[in-house]
Amino acid sequence: GNLALWGGRFAGGPADALAALSKSTHFDWRLAEFDIAGSRAHARVLHGAGLLDDEGLTAMLAGLDQLLADVRSGDFTPAPGDEDVHTALERGLIERAGADVGGRLRAGRSRNDQIATLFRMYLRAHARSVAALLLDVVDALLAQAKNHLGVAMPGRTHLQHAQPVLLSHHLQAHAWALLRDVDRLRDWDRRADESPYGSGALAGSSLGLDPLSVAHDLGFSRSSANSIDGTAGRDFAAEFAFVAAMAAVDVSRLAEEVVLWATKEFSFVTLDDAYSTGSSIMPQKKNPDVAELARGKAGRLVGDLAGLLTTLKALPLAYNRDLQEDKEPVFDAVDTLEVLLPAVSGMVATLVFNTDRLESLAPQGFALATDIAEWLVREGVPFRVAHEVAGSCVRVCEERGIELWDLTDADLVAINPNLTPDVRRVLTVEGSLASRDATGGTAPARVAEQLTAATKTSQEY
Ligand code: ARG
C-alpha cells in the first residue's frame, strides 16, 4: 500500500525521484526518542479532550513504550519507504498497537508543529552537553592558570611584544570568552523554552487539545503564543548555530596561539604526545593537529550558521519545505563541537609551559617602555612628554643594541633630567606587573582574585 501520510487525495505514490529527494530519515532519525515523547504527551491530551478512551490511551502508551524499546535496541529502524522520522514512527506504532489505536494519534497535530518542537527539544538537550564540554575547556585553562600563578610572559598586541603580563592572566582571557559562550547557551535556552506542539500545520488545533499541558510534559515552561510563529520560526536554530559558531571561533583563537606557541621559534609550550601527531615522512615532527583542527572546524561552524541563515532568508510564513534544510547544519555544529571540545580540553590540560623562556622573554622587545612613561607621569611629567622621553630611551637602546635596564644613570639623565635612578624600580617585570593593580589588571594580586571569580563562575554553571 501507499506508505505516505496523504493517501486519500492521491491516485498514486510519489515518483522515486521525489521520494529520494524528500527523504530525511538519514538525518532526522536522531530525533526519534523526542518524537515518541511528543506522541506520549499528545496521546494524553487526546485522552483529556475525550478523543481517546481509557483503553485506547493504555494501548497507545503501551505501543509507544514498545516502539521506544525497539528504537533503542535497533529492532525498529526507518524503512526505505519512510519519508521522515515522523512517518516511520507512525508506521512503527501502527505495527505495534494496531491501525485503529495507532491511526488515532495523528489527530490535531501536524509534522509541522512536531518537528518545530522536537528540534527544540534536541537542541535544548545538546545545549547542556555542549555547555558542559565548554566548561571542561574552561576548567583546563583555569587549572593551568592556577599552576602557573606568578609566571610572566610577553603580552602582545599586533603579535608584537607590548607589555609583560602574567601567563595566568592570558589563559584566563580565553576562559572568560568561553564562559560567556556558556552564558549565551543558557540565555538561548530561555527563548527556546517554548513548545509549538498544538500549533498544528499553522493555524492551531480545533480539537480542544491543551498545548500547555503538552509543553509541560515535554519539559517546556510555555507553549507558543502564535501557531504561525510556532511552526515557521527558526530563529532558535539560527541563534543556536551562532552560539556554536562563536564558541568554535573562541576556541580557534586559543588554538591558533597553541600552534604558534608550539613552534621552535616561540617554544612556549610542549604538547603532550597524546595530543600531538607525527609525520609519515619526517621522523622528527610533532604536530599540533588538535589545535589546527580546532581552527579548521571553526570555519565549518561558521558555514553551518551562514547556510542556515541563507535558508531562512526571505522565506514566507508559515511552514515551507525548505525548512527541512534547517536541521543538518545545526546537527553538524553539535556533532563537531561534541567531538572537538574533549580533544581541546585534553590538549590544554596537558600543555607543558616553558616557564623559563616565557619569563626571560617577558621584558624583551622594550616591553617596559610604557612603564618608564607612566613612572614619569607619576613624577608629574605630562604624558605627551613622558611618551617622547620613553621613546628616546628605546631609540638609544636600539642604536646601541642594549635593553632599557642597561642604560646607566648618566645615560638616563642625559636623555631627560627627570629620569633619576629611581626609574629602575619599574624596569623589572615584577615592578611592571605589580604596578597594574587596578581591577582587571595583570598584577599578581588581581590575577589571583580573578582566578577565584572565574572558578566560581564556572562552578555556578
Ligand atoms: N520532515 C519535515 C521537516 O523536517 C517535516 C515534515 C513537514 N512536511 C510537510 N510536508 N509539511 O521539516
Image (cartoon, rainbow, N blue to C red):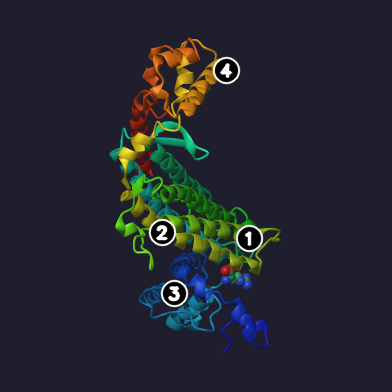
Screen quadrant of the N terminus: bottom right
Q: In which quarter of the image is ligand 1?
A: bottom right
Q: Which mark is residue 460?
A: none
Residue at the disc numbered 2: 289
Q: Residues within 10 Å of mark 4 (few under 14, many from 20)?
A: few
- The picture places residue 195, in percent across and down from the top left corner, at 53, 57
Q: Which amino acid, mark 3?
A: Met
Mark 3 or mark 4, earlier in chain: 3
As drawn, 96 above or below 315: below
Q: Determine the CA span between mark 3 and mark 4.
A: 81 Å
Out of 88 and 456, give the one closest to the viewer. Answer: 456
Residue at the disc numbered 3: 60
In this rendering, the label closer to the viewer, 3 or 1: 1
Residue at the disc numbered 4: 384
Residue at the disc numbered 1: 232
Residue 2 appears anywhere in the view: yes
Mark 1 or mark 2, earlier in chain: 1
Query: Circles 4 and 2: CB distance less than 8 Å?
Result: no
